[in-house]
Image: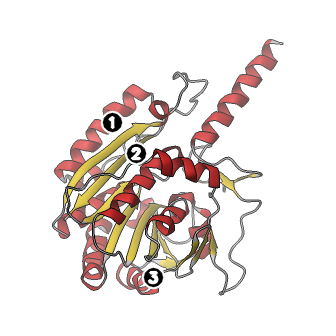
Amino acid sequence: MKHSKHAALAALAAAFVTALCGCAAQSQVTAPAASSATAAEIIITTEEYSAPRSGKDMLECRFWNERNFTTYDSRSVTYGTDGGKLLCGVAPHHLTAGHFIAGMYKAAAASGGEIDTVVLVAPQHYPGNDVLVTSTVDWSTPFGVLEADTGAAQLLCDELGARCDDSMMQYDHSASSHIPFIRYYLPKAKVCCLLVAPGAGKDLPQRYAEAMAKLAEERKCFFAFSIDFSHYLSPDLAEMHDGETREAVLSGDIETILGFGNDNVDTPLGLGAFVELSKRLGGTVTEADNANTWSLGELPYSPAIYPEGVTSYFVFLTQG
């Protein structure tokens, strides 16, 4: 009897953490074993992992849930930008904080001027052949087709050495979780996504910022960064490391950012690219929101409910 109670509690905890990450599915498929993601992150909303069937097929939003999306929209706020143009933004990819994602794109839509292209940078969670991955394939969303900006993707290939991998792009939740938000809040924009693996090199922020500064001269861009922050810690430790991250971002300390690990951020290269690009574009970075899975939930913190600790989230905005 005692054993069965423990098993039931463990099952409840696992289900709760999976729901927090926005990854509940009709059928659950475990991602490749070599991933650095947590167990809760690697449950995907699809019956199987498959590449687009032909060059005419579109990428799918595999993490879409209509009821959840309605909740994210209703809970979100339009982050203020003091009347200035929003150039860049950081928001999570865990749908636990889906209202943070909605708020960032709402702010981009409200900041003035029609956006031609959203360039989205996100961490590559699963091992692949390339450290920088993009795609030129359009996305099928519940709100219509989100066209790929093939010219921007080609620039990433030419300037950064990115390679197209449609299957990886569709499969990794770090980019695909943002796609419905982009199509919903910025319906006239195209999208260009870049998945960044840890081995992409510490010079990536500078190379990315240089290439995107060129793109910004040709298009009306919003540069989005899909980033989660402190991982695997108690709420108190997560808040302490969030303080370190906040100071580094707001002071523009890229060297410190590139030295961070999972205690602070899941993709130091992506966060460094955000800070470097913000500088290149002459923008001012502000913090718009911060929370973690425990503070967003309704249950008391305990290792049984959070066996892998909590994940923290920020919204940072760059205004020009």
Q: Earlier in the sequence, mark 2 or mark 1?
A: 2
Q: Earlier in the sequence, mark 2 or mark 3?
A: 3
Indicate the quadrant containing the N terminus: top left, top right, bottom left or bottom right: top right
Q: Amino acid at mark 2?
A: Phe
Question: How many callouts does the rendering have?
Answer: 3
The residue labelled by disc 3 is 149
- Which residue corresponds to the image point at 45% horizontal and 61% vertical from the top-left? 122
Q: Mark 3 falls on what kind of element?
A: loop
Q: Amino acid at mark 1?
A: His
- Observer-nearest residue: 196 or 58? 58
Q: Earlier in the sequence, mark 1 or mark 3?
A: 3
- Which residue corresponds to the image point at 27% horizontal and 52% vertical from the top-left? 80
- Which residue corresponds to the image point at 60% horizontal and 49% vertical from the top-left? 68
Is 39 rendered above or below residue 53? above
Is 187 rendered above or below residue 155? above
Q: Are marks 2 and 1 in contact (CB under 8 Å)?
A: yes
Indicate the quadrant containing the C terminus: top left, top right, bottom left or bottom right: bottom left
- Observer-nearest residue: 148 or 265? 148
Q: Mark 2 falls on what kind of element?
A: loop
Using the image, tell me which numbered label, if any, was put on residue 241: 1
Determine whether, in the image, residue 211 is placed left or right of residue 153. left
The residue labelled by disc 2 is 229
Q: Percent position (x, y) of residue 117?
A: 39, 76
